[in-house]
Each structure stands twice: as structure tokens, then as C-alpha cells.
Image (cartoon, coloured by chain):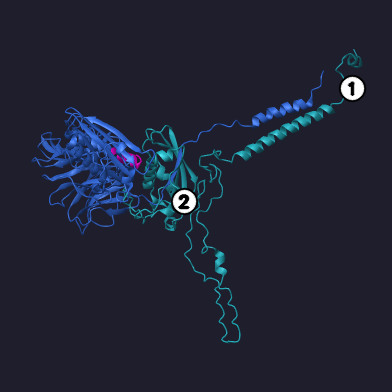
Amino acid sequence: MSTAAYNQINPLAADPGQFSLRRFLIYSLILHGLLVLFIALSVYIKFNREQWGGIGGEPGSVDVKLVGPPAGIPLPPKRSVPESVAADPAETLYKEEEAPKPLPLPAVQPPKPVEKIAPFKKEKPLPETHKSKVDQPKNPPPDNAVPGKGAPPKIPSSFSSQPPGGGAGPIIVQGQGGGDFASRYAWYIESVRRRVSQNWIQTSIDPAVRAAHQAHAVMTFTINRDGSVRNVKIEQSSGNLSMDNSARRALDGIQFGPLPNDFSGSYVDVTFDFDLALTH
Amino acid sequence: MVPLNLRTCRCLFAVAVLTFLVKPASAQQVAPWFRTGTGLGIEKIRVAVASFGPRGDNAKTHSDQFTQIVRDDLASSGILDLVSPSFYPTQTLSQPSELQNAAWTDPQVKANYVAFGNIAETSTEVAIQAWLYDVNNPSAQAVVAKIYRGAPTDLQVRKFAHQFADEIISKLSGGLPGIASTQIAFISSRTGTKEVWVMDYDGANQHPLTSLRTISLTPRWSPDVSRIAFTCYQPFNGVVNAQICMYSMDAGKVVSFPHFRGTNSAPAWSPDGTQLMFSSSMQGTPELYVTDSSGGKPKRLTLSGVGGATSPTWNPKTGQSVVFVSDRGGIPKLYMMNADGSNASILDLPDKGYVIDPAWSPNGQILAFSWRRPDGNYDIYVMEPTSLQIINLTPNAGARNERPSWAPDGRHIVFESTRAGTRQIWTMLADGSQARQLTTTGHNESPNWSPK
């Protein structure tokens, strides 16, 4: 039959002259627009709630933020050696200025001395530190480089090279803990501290960095039930490759004593500070 | 058809999407953690050992003995200070309920940990309750809580005391082994002939293993402490020569080991115990050979030419490098080579003189040896092979100090010394301090510390 006849009997077929898809097109666009909006909103909310790379701060635990870049993404390294006044090149432009001699005329007030600039002290410039990067530097120092005329061999004994009479308490906050581990097992924390500290061989650290006593690396790891270690990570780089490597090596293959018998957990997370400023 | 109500549709849609946005608040527990750091350096831990309380008069001797041995073990451990008993508070302390923290943290005593307990004894059994408490921590305190039961003999009580001391060392040092239960094998001539003897690490319990009535030398524990390889004089094809001999701790006697031509001496075990290296002149000049642990398949490793090679010591951490003594350069010097004999090179020292008796530390990082410099006598030196830095551990001893051997904790060294007049066995900490004489009878030499 003809199209016109068919259209007449088909109730759904609108009049071709009057039928327009435009209405449905608009509805469709609105719905799609809403969908896109909701997706964008959810992504925005998700990003705001969680810091990139963070653990998701639960109340009561230490908010261990990853200060360094997530693995594999190279970011400009943070300089650990603070700018000092002496190292600031602009300082060399200041000239010493003497106050002018007051005129020996009693009647005249001596002119106020020009503001005296502190004499420029030429301090020893801080040593150049090797920047550490997350990806391999172009000329990495050999892995087991030990400076030829370094310190005497590290005799594994607690007598060696420690400051006499350790002071009132460590400067670094020690023995922080969550999940009540620190309150119940202070002795275990102390034993881990000793073990790692004694395993930390500083002779392989850049001698200039050692002399400056200014490097701080933070490592994190997990101790299993049996005392073995997993997940060793650099939490905060010191900015110096030899220092970071020495911290990593201190934990390499280390096996602690098993976790306390009456501790119910199967592991404990540890954050460990390696700080040259506090050592001999 | 009813047209779709767009508003309800949108609402439903919005609801559906929103439910996916709101993450269910996961009830995350606080994972156990702690933070600590290198701090101001390591002060020595201060431990007090209260007199163990005898429960009954018959336990008095053993409780005194137990207390004294624990005190000695902790004092010589090299990682903690034993608080002198003269400063202890006068309370009786044999149960945790009797412990008063304040008395022990008092500035006069200043203990970090207190060990205490009690001993009960019958004719058939001794029972020892032993605790170590952290007196700085008012809440949870017990670090060690043990009960030891066994035969009521001096030997058994001594063993228990060593075990308790080792437990304390292990817990407080963060997993490092204590050496209170280790032994030292050595050569003693006090019976008239040089035989292999064994004693506890503190010199107690000295007794002979062999009675071969020839000459025995250079005992070396196997890594699993089941056997001691040594040099002894045995016939081979009718000729009495130095041979590698083997004592089995399990069997309690000398067991057979293949004999070879020439002089065979200075055995050294591979870290996994499957191989034995020794010096042999079976093919002319003394060279280093390696065999499997039952003496089969000897293979030559070195080619010293005019000189010889002896006293091998295998790096216990890597098993890859071996240090030995060779006089191929004219006088005995230290050389390092791979375990397969390749790449032998001299270990340079900043002075002349005979260098002998090398011994690797358990962590494979430090070499101890004996060196007679032109201006002195034999002294024990330690060296880091990577940096070639050296330290003299026995300066001013005015005697011969030779044949160092490391304890498995890497903190102690046993050696032979003539500083007391005759050749005796001495121990010291790995920095040269706390030198202590272990033997007094006859002549005693060539000590070797058991690996466990």
C-alpha cells in the first residue's frame, strides 16, 4: 500500500510534516549533560578527599604523608642543605661601611652614624652535595664506594664512636606509636632502634655530607611476626644519594627478634629516622 | 503511551549516581606502628640481675651459681652494662609481685631492666622461674618470662643460666644472637700430647675430645657444629704425614677422612658446610685444595709457584671469596681469591712483616689476622678489606698474639697469647677491650669459636 495509507493506519507514525525529533534530542542532551556533570563531580570529590599517594588520614594514626614523589615519577629533588647566609652569593655585594668619625666640634651634634652593616664574615661555604634523584643519576657513584681514607673499620661493638653520656633524651620524637604498641613494648622499639643504629655504616656517606652533620633520611618498613622485614621504602629522602643508600643498606637483610609473644597483631609498621645531626 | 516523566527519571538517575559517590565509611582499624630513629647515639643498656631466690635451703648453691653465671654472661656480652650488685636495693625479689620499680630506677641504681626469679629443687629436678622486667615502663613490663626444668646438676643449671642470658641479649639487642651457649675448640698439651679440647665460651667445662697421642692442630667447627675438622698426624702409605682428620660431635669420636700424600693441614669449611678447603702438598708445593665435606673429589685451586699457600678462610656471608696466606712474594702475606681459585691478589698492608692467621668476621666485612711488624711482635689486627683501614687490637701486650677466631655474634674474638707467660687462650671484645684469660693449665693454642 502507499506510504500515506500506511501512515494513516499506524497510530505511532506522526505526521511527517509535524513530527520533529528535536524534543527528544533536547532531553537526550540534558541527560547526557547531567551524566557528565555527575562524573565530574564525583571525580572532584574523590580527589579532594584523598591526598594523592596518601594513606587516607584515619584519626589516631600518624599521618604519614609521602613527601617524596610516588615511585617512578621523577620530581625535582628537595635540597636538604639549607641555604645559609654565607652561601648566599648576594651577600658578597654588601660592603662594610664604617660609621663616619664624629666631628670634634662641641657645638655641633655629631652626625648620626650610618647604620652599621655587620662585617661580612667569610664563612666556609657549605659543601656541594650530590643531588639524589629517584631515577638513576648520570654518573652514579659505584655501589660499594668506600672513601679510601675514611674512618677506621666499623667494629661491631657498642663502644665504637658514640658521644659520651647520651643526653636527656633524643631530639627526634622517639617511641611514638599507635595501636598501643609503643606503650606496651617500649623495649622492643628500643631494641629495633639499637639494631638499626648499629647496622648503620656511615663510612660510605659522602665525607662532605658527614662533616656538615646535616642529613636526615626517613625510611619506612614493616616487621613481620617472625622479625623479618618487608616493604622497605624511603619515606623522605635526605637529598643525598650516599646518605639514602646508607640508610637503605642499614635495613638490608636485617632480621629482628620476633614480635613480642603477647602481641596479638601479625606485623608492625615502623618509621625510622636516620639523622646525621644527632650522631658523633 | 505515557510519556516518560523526565523529572522522576532525573531524580532516579541522580540517586543512582550519588550512591556510587558516597563511599561506605570503612571501619578501618589503626594498624600497629611506631616511629623511632638513630637519636643521640647508643647508650649502653643497664641491666641489674637480682639474686635469684632459693625456695628452700637445698636450692641455695644453685641459685647463687645461676645468679653469678647470668651476671657474668651479661657483663661480657659487650652490649649492656651490668649494674653493680653493690648498688642494688635490699629488697628480696623473687616474684613479679615483689618488684618495686621505683627502687630500681632510683638514680643510685638507674637500671633499665631487672632480671630476677627463684629456684626450687628436689632430688630429681630443679625448676627455675626467671623474669626480665622493664622497670621504666609502669604498665606492661615483662620482657622475658621463662621456666626452666631439668636435672638438678651444676652442668644443667649452668646451661639454663646461659640460655636465660642469651634470651635477654637477643630480646634487648633486637634479634642478635647471644654467645653464652657457644663453645670454643682448641688444642691443649696438658695431657702430654697435643689433643683437641673443647670448653664453654667462658672457659668453663674444659674437656678433651681426642686422645690420638700424636700431634693435633688447627681445629675448625663445621657450620652446623656437628663436626670438627682438624690436622693430625696419621700414616699414609706407611709414611706419617699431616692429614685432615674429622671428629664427629654426634658420634663422639674421630671418624674416617681420606688421607693424601704430603702435608695436609689448615682445614676451612665453606659457609654451607658442603666443602672443605685445606692446604696440601700432595702435588709438590703446598697449595690450596677443595674437597666435598667427606673428602672426595679434591681439586687444586692455587698455583703459588715457588712459595706455598695455606690458612684459607672462607667469607662466611658470601661464600665467594677466600683469604689465605702465601709466601710466593718471599714472606707470608695475605691474598684474596675467588672460591674457585681465580683472581688471586695480594692484600696490601702499609708495613712490612709476616702476616698470618686470617679470619673473616661472621658478617663477612672485617678480616682479623696476626701481624708481626718490623718494630714489634705478633699482634691481632682487624681490617676492612674494602677500605684497607686497619686497627691493632693488642697494642702494648708485649707478647705474641696469634690465631684469632670470631664469635658468631661478631662482637668477640678468641685468640692465643703469651702475655701471661705461657701460651694460653684469651678472649676479648672485637675492639680489643675486656681481654680475659680462659685457660691456665699447660700450653693451649689454636682456638676456634663454634658458629652456634
> In this rendering, do the residues under marks 1 and 2 share a single chain?
yes
Which mark's residue is nearer the viewer, 1 or 2?
2
Q: Is residue B178 above or below residue B419?
A: above
Q: Is residue A147 above or below residue B204?
A: below
* Chain painted blue: B
Viewport quadrant of the N terminus of chain B: top right
Task: Look at the numbered disc 1 and give the secondary structure of its residue.
Answer: loop
Residue B173 within the magenta-colored segment of the rendering: yes
The residue lying furthest to the top in this view is: A1
The answer to whether residue A158 is seen in the rendering is: yes
The answer to whether residue B304 is seen in the rendering is: no
- Report the residue marked by disc 1: A16
Measuring from the top left, give residue A8's x and y in whole percent: 91, 15
Q: Chain of mark 1?
A: A
What is the crowding at mark 2: few (fewer than 14 residues within 10 Å), some, or many (at least 20)?
many
Viewport quadrant of the C terminus of chain B: top left
Toward which corner of the image does residue A212 lie, by quadrant? bottom left
Measuring from the top left, give residue B385's x and y in whole percent: 32, 49
Measuring from the top left, give residue B391's x and y in whole percent: 28, 54
The boundaries of the magenta stretch are: B166-176
* Chain painted cyan: A
Q: Residue at x 60, y 87 (%)?
A: A107
Q: Residue at x 18, y 27 (%)?
A: B124
Residue B340 within the magenta-colored segment of the rendering: no
- Report the residue marked by disc 2: A216
- Disc 1 versus disc 2: distance between alpha carbons? 79 Å
**Left of A9 or right of it: where is B291?**
left
What is the crowding at mark 1: few (fewer than 14 residues within 10 Å), some, or many (at least 20)?
few
